[in-house]
Image (cartoon, rainbow, N blue to C red):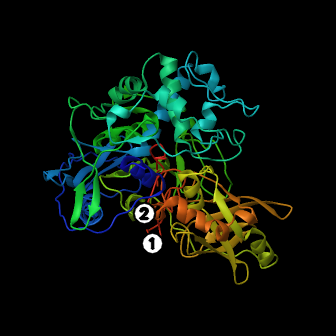
Amino acid sequence: MTDATRRAVLSAVGGLVGAGSATGLPTGSTPNATRSPTAAGLPPRDDLEAFVDETMEAHVGEVTPGLTVAVVEGDDVVLAKGYGHADTTSGRPVRADGTTFQIGSVSKLVTWTAVMQGVEDGVLELDADVDAYLGDSRVTIPDTYEAPVTLGALGTHTAGFESRLPAAFEDPADLTSIETALVERRPDRVRPPGEAVEYSNWGTMLAGHVVAEAHDTTFEEYVRTEVFEPLGMEHSTFRQPVPTSHPGERARPHERREDGFAPTASTWINARPAGSMSATATDMAAFMRAHLNDGAVEDGRILEAGTVDRMHRRHHVRHPAVNNWRYGFYEHGPVGAGAIGHSGSTGSFESQLVLVPGQDVGVFVGYNAAPSGGVVAGDVDRILREYDLLPGTPPPTPATASGRRRRAEAVAAEYAATAFSYDDGPERALGLLSRVTVDTVGDGRLATRTLTGSGIGGSEWVETDPYVYREVGGDDVLAFDVADGSVGRMYVSSVPQTAYEPVPLADRAPVTGGVVAGAAGGFLLSLLGWAGATACRGRECLHGDRAGDREPRSNDAAGGPSVDEEVTVE
């Protein structure tokens, strides 16, 4: 396995980082923006900046060499700032308005915005068979099931494709066209569309290809002219590598060394619509403003208000008691918080974008390393919680005692994530590592554990409604589909990128543990947790990373989905 593939795999299921010693000073602040007197939540800019400074400066040299932050409120940029180093070798500082970071699977939000532009213009339909848009393309969709694959199913990761590890390269000369990457990496269809969430970078890559085909251009050129230019996002691009003539400076990827952080080789991915975008914090502020301001920033409009509303609406329900999918966005934080977003990771970069449309607030953070422990999602949530934009949750109220023990015993089992394939090789190893064991504890409580001890391993849960459980000491939720006493699927609210299915007795961990050790190798043990990265973000058992993680705990994993999964990749 190449180093590039290894980093992409790491990003798909969570990253590693330790502590460091380098220091850095904040640079690149934007001018103060006028705040609306009716705005809810955020304090005056000076108070917000002091809080963000304290939070982010503590990370510089400890969990990342550099990071970039943007906070917006409606059409105003409240804060955009860089911290630490874009490059530890040269000491070049991070500038919010001039240093581009790879944002991993947060890129997907731009891709799905482009799809919605096509829907708005009448060029694309969310419910139409994707085959209708492929024309003379070499890309084909297998006729595995009668129901067609649609853009609507792709945008909620319910098209039924198995997840695949990314094609990642250290030499950009190895990159191919999106069309060739789709042909060479086409996954199997493993379930009918609409049946279950199964995070798919390939599916987002397919959607980007459809956009390009429908407009007779390249994907990179389409988003440049139809998304980036109208919003003034002059530093943003999906091109790899970023051309030397492109505005701004690139943050270098870094990895943890014994004496701190050092630059590492860049990773390039073929699944460009799914995770290759580079952007500054100020560019991401413009993108968030457009989504919070009915599709427009000043004179630049990318969507009509009704289209933004349609995109932000719920489009797939895994289970009514957990976080679910909007279009391209997934729900973030405590259930019902009204927050939506996406995480991203490329193995050496981590990012998170969260919008609270009801409060007109958006937060973006990007790191040029891959922190562990849910740090990135935790930073976003600290900002949102500090100003009461993510509600706290009261201690769970236990369900009535009648039948509690029986229901707990019915759901006690080992579960495998739908978001990983189960072929031989690394995919199978990752599938095994993502498994969750549910045990009964006491009178009707549950305890969860994983093979690696990360993610939701070590949590206890109390039943609040039949077959719905709240995390003790947290705000996460487990929910089960049960019919005639038999479990169909389990859902974790903080991991919207997947569902979980019971593992047959013969395939459970005591039997497969040896397979994990042989197939995965030592480094894979660090992967469980992520992002959206693919399959489970942040607790992330799978890109991005877990979505809506509460204050990070020592056993939380970092995440998002992202690149080719980035796998994600999160």
Task: Give left or right: position of 155 versus 222.
Answer: right
Is any atom of residue 568 visible in this view? no
- Secondary structure of the residue carrying tag 1 is loop
Name the N-terminal-most of marks 1 and 2.
2
Q: How far across and how far down the image is residue 487, in percent?
A: 77, 61
Q: Which residue is mark 2?
A: 374
Q: How far across and how far down the image is residue 375, in percent?
A: 38, 63
**Image marks 1 and 2: residues in contact by CB distance under 8 Å:** yes
Query: Residue placed at 50% from the left, 68% from the top?
Result: 454
Disc assigned to residue 84: none
Question: Between 487 and 141, which is closer to the camera in this rendering?
Answer: 141
Tell me if residue 447 comes above or below residue 527 in the rendering.
Answer: below
Question: Between 42 and 440, which is closer to the camera in this rendering?
Answer: 440
Number of residues whose C-alpha sits closer than 10 Å to that of mark 1, classed few (under 14), some (14–19) or many (20 or more): some
Kind of residue sitting beneath label 2: Gly
Q: Which residue is mark 1?
A: 553
Query: Residue placed at 22% from the left, 48% from the top?
Result: 32
Mark 1 to mark 2 CA distance (whole Å) = 8 Å
Question: Between 223 and 244, which is closer to the camera in this rendering?
Answer: 244
Is any atom of residue 123 visible in this view? yes
Tell me if residue 496 comes above or below residue 100 in the rendering.
Answer: below
Query: Residue placed at 54% from the left, 55% from the top?
Result: 536
Q: How far across and how far down the image is residue 40, in percent?
A: 41, 54
Q: How far across and how far down the image is residue 17, in percent?
A: 34, 64
